[in-house]
Image (tube, grey):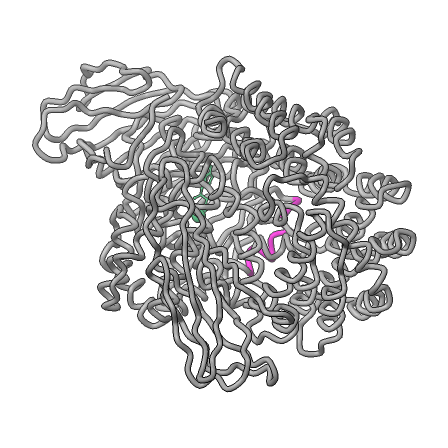
Amino acid sequence: PQEIRREDYRAPDWLVPAIELDFDLAAEKTLVTARLSVERNGEHDRPLRLDGDEIVPLAVLVDGAEARWTMDGATLVVELSENAAVVETRVALAPDRNSKLMGLYASGGLLCTQCEAEGFRRITFFPDRPDVLSRYRVRMSADKARFPVLLANGNPVETGDGEDGSHWAVWEDPFPKPSYLFALVAGDLAVNSDPFTTMSGRSVELGIWVREGDLPRTDHAMESLKQSMRWDEETYGREYDLDRFNIVAVDDFNFGAMENKGLNIFNSRYILAAPETASDADYDAIATVVAHEYFHNWSGDRVTCRDWFQLSLKEGFTVFRDQGFSAAIGSAAVERIEQVKSLRAGQFPEDAGPLAHPVRPDSYIEISNFYTATVYNKGAELIRMMHTILGPEAFRAGSDLYFERHDGQAVTCEDFVRAMEDASGADLRQFRLWYSQAGTPRVLARLEQDGAGATLHLAQTVPATPGQTDKKPMLIPLRVALIGERSGAELATERLILLDGEQSSVRFDDVGEPAFLSINRGFSAPVIVTAERRAGEIEALAVSDQDPFARFEAMQELMSRDLLAAIYGGAVETGATVAAIRSTLASNALDPAFKALAISLPTEAELAEKVDPVDPAAIHAAREAFRVAIGEALADDLEAAYAGAAADPDSLDSLAKGQRRLRAATLGLIAAGNPERGTELARRQFAEARTMSDRQAAMMALGTVGGDAWDEALDAFYRRFAGDPLVIDKWFSLQASAPRAETLDAVEALEKHPDFNLANPNRVRSLAGAYAMSPFAFHRADGRGYDWLARMIVAVDRVNPQTAARFVAPLGRWKRYEPVRSEKMRAALERIMAEPSLSKDVLEQVSKSLA
Ligand code: HT7
Ligand code: ZN
């Protein structure tokens, strides 16, 4: 397959200012007629090249007459003598046989589209690239009984009834947009609708479209949508711009959701929620994803990407915007800790492995493989660092300038940074390296104290990554404070240090007492900091740092220190952790959600990032021994905290959610220290649960212990929720992620379960994704876990390559594992590679992983 390179970008030869699409819709056969008004872009005599994918032209006309055309592979090449023309093409599609879920496909009786990144070329021939912006007029006709609702981007302009029980509708989108934002939906849908008045007083009709029976589960999404619309007005001055904003939920979807202009299409798991069926985490994810897609209306739709290498322009910025929204509606401290946890779980390993790439990649084979934690989450950290360096007012001025300057354009990450510079006067030349250099920088910190004050010595290195061996020093913003050893107070106001060289020393005057170092507060830079610590320093920071993130971090550092000693064969020493957890649980100043996060041990995956080579069994054994020791030592404190955190089951406010979370964290430790007692509490919690969070937490505790109670709970759960796909996904993933040796047997049985369906990405993720992310169960010394995953990747690839390619990464880290596992992981990758007719999605990931 061909590699596409960023440096080869060229402006399009032909523009398409307007397009008319006509869909004669049916699941088995849909006819698409497209009329493109094309204009030559600049002086050249090159033909019009229209991308296609698995479609054949039934007719090609230029200005109404038979055209001169050829096929170059999948591309339709049309010779044009004039500088402008109307090019008409006709194709036939079979949506019900489209298992890739890209282009026009059928899902649960609906017809819907997914065009990002390159799905539009599966619907019609078109220059399918984000810098070709067109006005769309879309006519749809379909059988009225099967597809009573017909939706597309923009506003409805006409409807009518046809012959033989058909009907039709025309929608027009006044905003020029790239083809990846095109969408239509046809089906039997019910709507939850609500009006919204924008800041300038315009009235917008909001609609959330679902199956009739799902309507009662749409209120939270609607509330989240209205909150995010208001927040974007107040925080970024961005107002919605069409008369309608529609969201449709579908069951089969490759991703979380899609920001098509005026017609967002969602994976139903990010829309539907009721306390019985959705956990608190699900509720929070719905609010975040609804906000994210809505925010794209400006950061993505009004201002879009010039090419796919610029993907982080819209995704990094929009993630940063949704993080700001989540912080505003919940607890900012808890949100920040969670963001960092997920960055460390997903992005740090990616940045340290064979699939590492810069936030703005230099090349790709299959663009779908670049919807990554690096582009999204590290990209958001880059925006956050600019916010930190510039300050909130200058950042807002930069964002205003960016939207004003580039409204209606397809632009680059460079354009964003330049707008920030122009609005603030800041010099971000060195900062730009964050876009081009991959790898997580490492910072060493040492605080040297003397009579008059203290000097902080800092040094940075950026590790080599595939294709990038020599790195330049980055601009690293570090929020730093010194904390008095005796007083516990901050000795000077917090400072923002901009580390720009390989080494640097920063002087702190007037430090009147011995000081502890609180560094990278709020996780101001996405780096790995290793600080030289004095005796008692971490213990003190873990219970007293005023910055909540730094306090959480100190707790993790403390536990990691002692866990790593145990992993490397030392004694299991939990004294310091026990004291810190006791003090955390007893604090009246901390909210329960923070407590839950602070007392949670680093995960096995996080610990794996800190050891070399990785022996998952040793990590699991040490961590379990640690959990047992803590559970035993703190039995009374944990019981008291568990009992004291009983939450109002009817409340979804931060307090109730935090209490449920704290109960989950304490229950896990109680069960570790005393499995019998833990089982008793978990059984009761499961039986009495009125929320999915309580039920799920009880099941997780039971899943760790195993035995009859676990089997009974699984049966009861299934009986109660059979037929409810989103809840049955949980049933699959709870079993696939149980940290026990027998988990693979359960996974193999689940693969044969009548509810397992290779064609449904949610179901595949809930089995294969959950299993591959469960380090102990997956990394079996006999390699059977790897074999299972490799077989699953090949099977899924035949149905849905995008989804299959996502599961390669867990095998791809083989070089980091101890020799026995490492060899078996590599062999599993080789076996995938040997399969004939692999998709380019899987081929790219596997070949890069083996390199
Ligand atoms: N911008 C959307 C990306 C997306 C996607 C990408 C590849 C294949 C299928 C997809 N569905 C949605 C989602 C977002 O970031 O908001
Ligand atoms: Zn996005």
Q: Nearer the viewer, residue 411 or 430?
A: 430
Q: As drawn, is 16 to the left or to the right of 572?
A: left
**Magenta residues, start to end:** 213-223
Residue at screen point 34% across, 59% down: 475
Q: As drawn, is 276 to the left or to the right of 293?
A: right
Q: As drawn, is 838 to the left or to the right of 545?
A: left
Q: As drawn, is 643 to the left or to the right of 10?
A: right
Q: In this orientation, does residue 155 appear?
A: no
Residue at screen point 40% across, 19% down: 54
Which quadrant of the rendered structure holds the C terminus?
top left
Instruction: Characterize the magenta stretch by its predominant secondary structure.
Output: helix
Q: State the image coordinates of residue 635 (x, y, percent, origin top left).
A: 86, 64
Q: Is residue 219 magenta?
A: yes
Q: Nearer the viewer, residue 103 or 734?
A: 734
Q: State the image coordinates of residue 511 (x, y, percent, origin top left).
A: 48, 83
Q: State the image coordinates of residue 578 (x, y, percent, origin top left).
A: 76, 65
| Residue 720 found in image quarter | top right
Which quadrant of the rendered structure holds the N terminus?
top left
Q: In this orientation, does residue 247 appear?
A: yes
Q: How many marks?
A: 0
The outermost residue toward the front is 451
Q: Is residue 534 above or below residue 323?
A: below
Residue at screen point 67% across, 65% down: 593
| Residue 535 found in image quarter | bottom right
Q: Is residue 125 magenta?
A: no
Q: Nearer the viewer, residue 262 or 710?
A: 710
Q: State the image coordinates of residue 743 (x, y, percent, origin top left).
A: 76, 34
Residue at screen point 73% across, 67% down: 581
